Image (spheres, grey):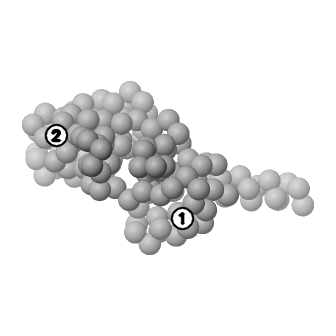
Amino acid sequence: MLVKDIMQADVITISPLATLREAMDQMKRHKVKSLVVERRDEHDAYGIVTYTTILRTIIAEEGDIDLVNVYDVCTKPVITVPPGMHVKYVARLLVAQQLRRLVVLESDELVGLITMNDIVGEFLAMAEKAHVES
Protein backbone atom coordinates (compact mmCIF):
# COMPACT_ATOMS: atom_id res chain seq x y z
CA MET A 1 0.00 0.00 0.00
CA LEU A 2 1.33 3.41 -0.98
CA VAL A 3 0.93 6.87 0.55
CA LYS A 4 -1.21 8.02 -2.39
CA ASP A 5 -3.71 5.24 -1.63
CA ILE A 6 -4.63 6.58 1.82
CA MET A 7 -3.42 10.20 2.00
CA GLN A 8 -5.82 13.11 2.39
CA ALA A 9 -5.65 15.01 -0.89
CA ASP A 10 -7.84 17.89 0.28
CA VAL A 11 -5.31 19.77 2.41
CA ILE A 12 -6.21 23.02 4.13
CA THR A 13 -3.45 25.63 3.93
CA ILE A 14 -2.84 28.97 5.60
CA SER A 15 -0.66 31.98 4.92
CA PRO A 16 2.42 32.29 7.13
CA LEU A 17 1.33 35.87 7.86
CA ALA A 18 -2.06 34.84 9.29
CA THR A 19 -2.57 35.22 13.02
CA LEU A 20 -3.05 32.27 15.33
CA ARG A 21 -6.68 33.34 15.78
CA GLU A 22 -7.18 33.04 12.02
CA ALA A 23 -5.52 29.62 12.08
CA MET A 24 -7.81 28.47 14.90
CA ASP A 25 -10.87 29.78 13.03
CA GLN A 26 -9.83 27.94 9.89
CA MET A 27 -9.20 24.70 11.81
CA LYS A 28 -12.62 24.94 13.43
CA ARG A 29 -14.38 25.76 10.15
CA HIS A 30 -12.77 22.84 8.29
CA LYS A 31 -12.80 20.47 11.29
CA VAL A 32 -9.06 19.71 11.06
CA LYS A 33 -6.29 19.52 13.65
CA SER A 34 -3.52 20.96 11.49
CA LEU A 35 -2.90 23.38 8.64
CA VAL A 36 -0.10 23.31 6.11
CA VAL A 37 1.68 26.65 6.08
CA GLU A 38 2.09 27.93 2.53
CA ARG A 39 5.46 28.72 1.03
CA ARG A 40 6.23 32.39 0.45
CA ASP A 41 8.00 31.61 -2.84
CA GLU A 42 9.26 28.63 -4.82
CA HIS A 43 12.47 28.45 -2.78
CA ASP A 44 10.72 28.42 0.58
CA ALA A 45 9.71 25.31 2.52
CA TYR A 46 6.24 24.24 3.62
CA GLY A 47 5.45 24.35 7.32
CA ILE A 48 2.75 22.97 9.57
CA VAL A 49 0.81 24.36 12.50
CA THR A 50 -1.20 22.10 14.81
CA TYR A 51 -3.58 22.35 17.74
CA THR A 52 -0.69 21.40 20.01
CA THR A 53 1.50 24.20 18.66
CA ILE A 54 -1.28 26.72 19.14
CA LEU A 55 -2.02 25.51 22.68
CA ARG A 56 1.65 25.79 23.66
CA THR A 57 1.75 29.31 22.25
CA ILE A 58 -1.45 30.36 24.03
CA ILE A 59 0.05 29.21 27.32
CA ALA A 60 3.40 30.89 26.65
CA GLU A 61 1.86 34.13 25.35
CA GLU A 62 -0.86 34.14 28.03
CA GLY A 63 -3.65 33.98 25.49
CA ASP A 64 -2.66 36.84 23.16
CA ILE A 65 -3.12 35.04 19.85
CA ASP A 66 -3.90 38.12 17.76
CA LEU A 67 -0.31 39.36 17.90
CA VAL A 68 1.38 36.08 16.95
CA ASN A 69 1.65 35.04 13.31
CA VAL A 70 1.55 31.44 12.12
CA TYR A 71 5.10 31.88 10.77
CA ASP A 72 6.39 32.57 14.28
CA VAL A 73 5.27 29.23 15.72
CA CYS A 74 4.90 26.74 12.85
CA THR A 75 7.21 23.79 12.36
CA LYS A 76 9.28 24.58 9.30
CA PRO A 77 10.58 22.93 7.25
CA VAL A 78 8.07 20.16 7.63
CA ILE A 79 9.10 16.55 7.01
CA THR A 80 7.71 15.38 3.68
CA VAL A 81 7.22 12.09 1.87
CA PRO A 82 6.43 11.26 -1.77
CA PRO A 83 3.05 9.79 -2.77
CA GLY A 84 4.76 6.66 -4.12
CA MET A 85 6.38 5.70 -0.80
CA HIS A 86 5.22 2.51 0.89
CA VAL A 87 3.07 3.20 3.96
CA LYS A 88 5.14 0.91 6.20
CA TYR A 89 8.11 3.29 5.84
CA VAL A 90 5.91 6.27 6.63
CA ALA A 91 4.67 4.50 9.76
CA ARG A 92 8.27 3.83 10.82
CA LEU A 93 9.19 7.49 10.22
CA LEU A 94 6.20 8.75 12.21
CA VAL A 95 7.07 6.51 15.16
CA ALA A 96 10.81 7.19 15.04
CA GLN A 97 10.35 10.97 14.89
CA GLN A 98 7.35 10.99 17.26
CA LEU A 99 5.17 12.74 14.68
CA ARG A 100 1.46 12.45 13.92
CA ARG A 101 1.37 13.72 10.34
CA LEU A 102 3.55 14.27 7.28
CA VAL A 103 3.12 16.46 4.24
CA VAL A 104 3.04 14.69 0.87
CA LEU A 105 4.94 16.41 -1.95
CA GLU A 106 5.24 15.46 -5.59
CA SER A 107 7.67 17.44 -7.75
CA ASP A 108 8.02 19.88 -4.84
CA GLU A 109 4.27 20.63 -4.89
CA LEU A 110 1.78 19.91 -2.10
CA VAL A 111 -0.47 16.97 -3.00
CA GLY A 112 -1.63 15.65 0.37
CA LEU A 113 -1.25 14.93 4.03
CA ILE A 114 -0.89 11.55 5.71
CA THR A 115 -1.54 11.03 9.40
CA MET A 116 -0.99 8.31 11.94
CA ASN A 117 -4.80 8.00 12.12
CA ASP A 118 -4.98 7.39 8.35
CA ILE A 119 -2.46 4.56 8.60
CA VAL A 120 -3.92 2.94 11.72
CA GLY A 121 -7.43 3.19 10.28
CA GLU A 122 -6.36 1.48 7.08
CA PHE A 123 -4.53 -1.29 8.95
CA LEU A 124 -7.58 -1.87 11.17
CA ALA A 125 -9.85 -2.05 8.11
CA MET A 126 -7.50 -4.56 6.47
CA ALA A 127 -7.37 -6.67 9.64
CA GLU A 128 -11.15 -6.62 9.96
CA LYS A 129 -11.58 -7.61 6.31
CA ALA A 130 -9.10 -10.50 6.74
CA HIS A 131 -10.93 -11.63 9.87
CA VAL A 132 -14.33 -11.62 8.14
CA GLU A 133 -12.94 -13.53 5.15
CA SER A 134 -11.38 -16.28 7.28
**Can residue 24 be seen here?**
no
CA separation in Å, label 1 and label 2? 31 Å
What residue occupies the far right of the structure in this picture? 134
Residue 58 x %, y %: 18, 45
**In this picture, residue 132 sits left or right of residue 79:** right
Between 131 and 68, the residue placed more toward the observer is 68
Tag of residue 91:
1
Write the residue at 40% across / 35% down: 12
Quick check: 28 above or below 60? above
Image quarter of the N terminus: bottom right
Tag of residue 69:
2
Image quarter of the C terminus: bottom right
Label 1: element kind: helix
Label 2: element kind: loop
Residue 48 x %, y %: 32, 48
Three-letter code, disc 1: Ala
Question: Which of pointers 1 and 2 lies earlier in the amino acid sequence?
Answer: 2
